[in-house]
Image: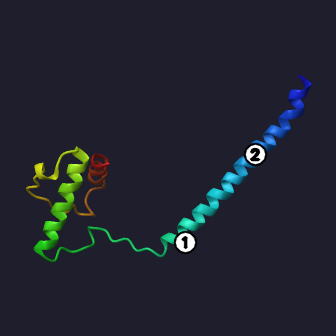
Amino acid sequence: MGEVFVRLPAAWAIIISAFAVLGIVLFIKLIYDISQSGSKKAVSLESAPLTSAGDEEEIVAVISAAIAAYLDKPSSSIRITSFRRVNASSNPWRSAGIREIMY
C-alpha cells in the first residue's frame, strides 16, 4: 500500500506534463492558423453580383450538384425551378432557422 503513495506524485507529474505539452502544441497551432488566415481573402456568394445569364446557370448547376450529392441521386434527376437570394439583414430568427435546416 505504501508503494502506491510513492508512485502517485510521479504519475500526476507525468499527466500534468502531458497536458502542458498538449497545450503548448495547440497554442502554436492556433498562432499558425491565425497568421495563415490573414493572408487569404474569402469571397462569399452573397457579395458577388450576378452579371450575366452564364453566372446564373453556373450557380444553378452548383446548387443542383450539391443537392444531388446530399440526396445521393444523379444530378440529372434534380430540377431546380427557381432560386432567390436571402437578405443578409433579414430577421435573425429566420436566418437561424435556415441555417439549422441547411446544416
Question: Which residue is painted at 55% across and 71% down in the image?
Answer: 35
| In the displayed structure image, the side of residue 19 where residue 58 appears, left or right | left
Question: Which residue is painted at 18% across and 45% down in the image?
Answer: 73
Say the numbered circle drawn on residue 53: none
Residue that lies at the very extreme toward the left in this rendered image: 81
Element carrying mark 2: helix
In the foreground, 80 or 91: 80
Question: Which residue is painted at 13% across and 76% down in the image?
Answer: 52
Amino acid on which the number 2 mark rests in the picture: Ile
Query: Which quadrant would residue 50 be assigned to in this image?
Result: bottom left
Amino acid on which the number 1 mark rests in the picture: Ser
Q: Name the residue under label 1.
A: 35
Rendered location of residue 92, percent (x, y):
31, 55
Residue that lies at the very extreme toward the top in this rendered image: 1
Rendered location of residue 98, percent (x, y):
26, 51
| In the displayed structure image, the side of residue 23 where residue 102 appears, left or right | left
Q: How crowded is mark 2: few (under 14 residues within 10 Å), some or many (20 or more)?
A: few
Q: Report how many numbered discs are placed on residues in the image.
A: 2
Rendered location of residue 63, percent (x, y):
20, 58
Please tell me which of labels 1 and 2 falls first in the chain: 2
Question: Which residue is painted at 14% across and 68% down in the image?
Answer: 56
Does 4 sit above or below residue 51? Answer: above
Does 14 sit above or below residue 56? Answer: above
Q: How crowded is mark 1: few (under 14 residues within 10 Å), some or many (20 or more)?
A: few
Element carrying mark 1: helix
| Mark 1 and mark 2 residues within 8 Å of each other at the beta carbon | no
Rendered location of residue 78, percent (x, y):
13, 50
Query: Which quadrant would residue 13 be assigned to in this image?
Result: top right
Q: Name the residue under label 2.
A: 16
Residue at mark 1 to residue at mark 2: CA–CA distance: 29 Å
| In the displayed structure image, the side of residue 30 where residue 6 appears, left or right | right
